[in-house]
Image (tube, helix red, strand yellow):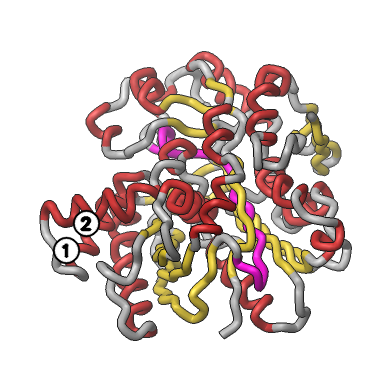
Amino acid sequence: MSRVGIEAMNVFGGSAVLDVMQLARHRELDLARLNNLLMKEKTVALPFEDPVTFGANAARPLLDRMSEEEKGRIELLITCTESGFDFSKSASTYLHDQLGLSRNCRMFELKQACYAGTAGLQMACNFILSGTSPGAKALVIATDISRYILEDGDDVATQDWAYAEPSGGAGAVALLISAEPHVFQLDVGASGTYGYEVMDTCRPAPDSEAGDVDLSLMSYLDCCEQAYRAYEAKVEGADYRDTFQYLAFHTPFGGMVKGAHRTMMRKVAKAKGAEIAEDFERRVAPGLGYCGRVGNIMGATVFLSLAGTICNGDYPDPRRIGLFSYGSGCCSEFYSGVVTPDGAERLRAMGIEDHLDARYQLSLDEYDQLLRESAFVRVGTRDTVVNQDFVARTAPAARTAQGAPGAGGGSPRLVLRAIKEFHREYAWID
């Protein structure tokens, strides 16, 4: 069978970060409730950051490692986001331009809540498998932001998003897909899908979210079981407990994943108590580290979990990873692939941990100021000049984030400069 999967991947977790527990105390939220999030910190989108800058900053270190000939073989660019800022024009065109890709490239955007990243991966892999352009590569960029906007004076705790705020992140994951899957070789055809219409969460307006938290949790749990059952029906001998050395989940917050894994171990593997806890620490916990430092980045989150699983797992020999991807509304998929010792080393060399460590630590006063100033970049903004004050303040962190050893050798950072007649203007800075 033909080989296909992730040749290279990279994570960009933003330029600035906020401590989640400090935020919870600042908002006077119930700390016992917050402990279930299993969150440490969250990325905060700065005024000069948007889905295009996040996506470009994730992809640029990958492209900087490629020859011009190799870059020229990227013939498909898919952006996966629910944070689009144009109801017609795809963010892929901006990314195509800023990354300097060949004009002989098909580009478009996918939207299916947090499932979009997996949809992009599967579509790109099928393009490679089709053989219609032998040797071609595809670039999939899953990029999303949660930009909270203060509407009613200073009473932040009364906002509808008060308890969602600590887990809502921002960032992107870039995947280079080819017939040379050095980092993650997809198990072709080994997938189970499950979906139906449900109003668990939605975005009725570009800058707002609505939904039913309890319904969303129940839908997630239902889809996790049923997507795996569909996988099991297609893959002979599949066993939830023994087939996968690791499991990576879409991670709205860590506690949700812990609950889903516990449910699966009880219902599918017929396990109990201590066995479930041990299995969680061994197979699932490695994938929660990066998610607990970035927050939920929608379609990119399952790949943030995959990156954590690869970088923080143990790979003395090839190991199979099972992935569960879920998008509200809803669509879900359980699929799998193999990571080799070489693949793990390749991803670790990208310096993701160094990047996350180097981000600028926001004070609570700075964060609240950002909330009050976020409205100027709302969807539909026609003209504005972006305040670049934070660029200078976060530049040292950005240089480490983008230029850590192995992470692109000093790749510059893309920032949003202005919006003129609805068109966004960007610039690369060192």
Q: Are marks 2 and 1 in contact (CB under 8 Å)?
A: yes
Residue 281, image x, y percentages:
27, 48
Q: Element under label 1?
A: helix
**Residue type at mark 1?**
Arg
- For image coordinates 26% across by 52% down, the residue present is 280
**Residue type at mark 2?**
Arg
Give the labeled residue for mark 1: 266
Question: Residue 47 is drawn in which quadrant?
Answer: top right
Query: Which is more toward the observer, 385 or 166?
Result: 166
Mark 2 and mark 1: span between their CA atoms? 6 Å
Q: Is residue 193 above or below residue 248?
A: below
Q: Is residue 4 above or below residue 403?
A: below
- The part of the chain drawn in magenta is 164-181
Residue 89, image x, y percentages:
76, 56
Can see residue 420? Answer: yes
87 left or right, relative to 428: left
Q: Is residue 221 magenta?
A: no
265 left or right, relative to 327: left
Q: Is residue 283 above or below residue 381?
A: below
Image quarter where the C terminus lies is: top right
Residue 60, image x, y percentages:
73, 46
Residue 338, image x, y percentages:
47, 67
Q: Element under label 2?
A: helix
Give the labeled residue for mark 2: 262
Looking at the image, which residue sits at the far top?
365
- For image coordinates 31% across by 49% down, the residue present is 256
